[in-house]
């Protein structure tokens, strides 16, 4: 069965209309269904804003329960707690309490990080509605009418067929396998050691996430906007770098090891000394990062890393040694926006 997420406005409207009808129509034909009334207590972690909408949850419940079952003043309570696990999965605790406040039923379900909040609310409502009906107290049977007087010659009553056994409840569908997710990132970076001074730049990254591991590839361009005096001329430096990393993710933290390589270009635009030199470099390093979810698909990310050149570039500094010739460590930081799909 395919389930698609609905728009926020539509979901709010459906949930709001359902709850209003449940409050102003208690004597409707649905009220004849002998299901005890419950009030709904739904809470979720702050990092899961889409899971903390009681209107959506109440609207989904009415697929299997009469609207009159949802009563904010009822003594029975349906308690749902949704938490986010460190790897991004969702843990749902469902508890049904009777009129005295005692726990009549409790169960737990885990949902993978790929499941959105609408899917979590849908299957939680399905399981809760089934348990509410199972826990409904049996109804008292009305006293049978007195039998009619016997006939002078009573005819034998036909035998009744045995009642058909009730069909067992369908088992819940198996959770779908974890699928890899891709992401793109765009941000700004600043580096020290890749050039003779602090250098700002642009960062474009992409990767593949398969919890708890991530593969990342990013490209950086770091121009040195201010020319530097080198000997008898001014030198302008531009750095291009390409990095491949393997990371271990335990949300919201990441730890990575990477290999980097690139090229350094120096240009001396002086009339007396016109020369352009391009030289390459290769290095290894480590990176740590933290992600802050902004929505179901967008997150902000902060990176800090240190790289050590193994093969240094040798740009022409007119007799002055460059940072790559000394193989000094390169420290970098970056701030990016991630889009996951």
Image: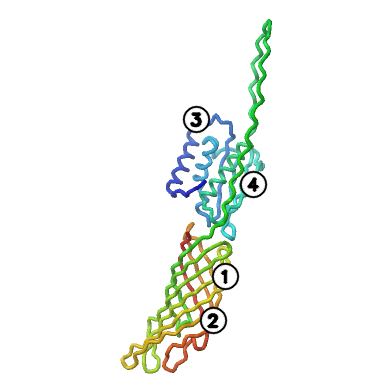
**Number of residues whose C-alpha sits closer than 10 Å to that of mark 4, classed few (under 14), some (14–19) or many (20 or more):** few
**Number of residues whose C-alpha sits closer than 10 Å to that of mark 1, classed few (under 14), some (14–19) or many (20 or more):** some
- Compared with 157, 40 (above or below) is below
Instruction: Name the residue beneath numbered marker 3.
Output: 28
Q: Where is residue 156 in the image (x, y as percent from the top left)?
A: 68, 12
Q: In which quarter of the image is residue 272?
A: bottom left
Instruction: Name the residue beneath numbered marker 2.
Output: 308
Q: Which mark is residue 107?
A: 4
As rendered, which of 123 and 200 lies closer to the eye?
A: 123
- Compared with 108, 199 (above or below) is below
Q: Earlier in the sequence, mark 1 or mark 2?
A: 1
- Badge 4 marks a residue whose secondary structure is strand
Q: Where is residue 179 in the image (x, y as percent from the top left)?
A: 54, 57
Q: Which of marks 2 and 3 is nearer the N terminus?
A: 3
Instruction: Name the residue beneath numbered marker 1.
Output: 255
Rounded to the nearest angstrom, the CA distance separating label 4 from label 2 is 52 Å
Q: Earlier in the sequence, mark 4 or mark 3?
A: 3
Of circles 4 and 1, which is in front?
A: 1
């Amino acid at each position: 069965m395919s389930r698609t997420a609905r728009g926020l406005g539509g979901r709010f409207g459906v949930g709001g209309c359902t709850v209003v009808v449940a409050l102003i129509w208690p004597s409707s034909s649905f009220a004849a269904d002998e299901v005890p009334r419950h009030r709904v207590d739904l809470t979720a972690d702050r990092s899961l804003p889409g899971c903390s909408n009681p209107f959506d949850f109440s609207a989904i419940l009415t697929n299997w329960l009469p609207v009159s079952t949802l009563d904010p003043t009822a003594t029975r309570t349906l308690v749902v707690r949704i938490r986010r696990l460190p790897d991004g999965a969702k843990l749902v605790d469902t508890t049904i309490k009777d009129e005295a406040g005692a726990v009549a039923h409790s169960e737990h379900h885990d949902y993978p990080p790929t499941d959105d909040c609408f899917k979590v609310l849908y299957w939680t409502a399905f399981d809760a509605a089934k348990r509410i009906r199972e826990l409904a107290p049996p109804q008292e049977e009305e006293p049978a009418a007195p039998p009619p007087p016997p006939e002078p010659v009573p005819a034998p009553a036909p035998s009744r067929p045995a009642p058909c056994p009730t069909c067992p409840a369908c088992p819940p569908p198996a959770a779908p396998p974890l699928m890899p997710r891709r992401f793109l990132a765009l941000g700004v970076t600043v580096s020290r050691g890749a050039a003779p001074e602090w250098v700002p730049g642009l960062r474009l990254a992409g990767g593949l996430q398969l919890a708890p591991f991530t593969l990342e590839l990013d490209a950086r361009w770091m121009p040195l906007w201010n020319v530097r005096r080198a000997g008898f001329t001014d030198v302008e430096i531009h750095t291009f770098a390409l990095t491949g990393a393997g990371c271990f993710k335990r949300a919201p933290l990441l730890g990575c090891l990477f290999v980097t390589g690139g090229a350094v270009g120096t240009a001396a635009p002086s009339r007396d000394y016109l020369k352009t030199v391009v030289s390459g470099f290769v290095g290894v390093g480590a990176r740590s990062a933290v992600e802050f979810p902004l929505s179901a698909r967008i997150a902000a990310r902060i990176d800090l890393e240190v790289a050590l050149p193994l093969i240094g570039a040798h740009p022409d500094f007119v007799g002055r040694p460059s940072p790559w010739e000394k193989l000094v460590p390169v420290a970098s930081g970056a701030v990016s926006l991630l889009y996951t799909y």
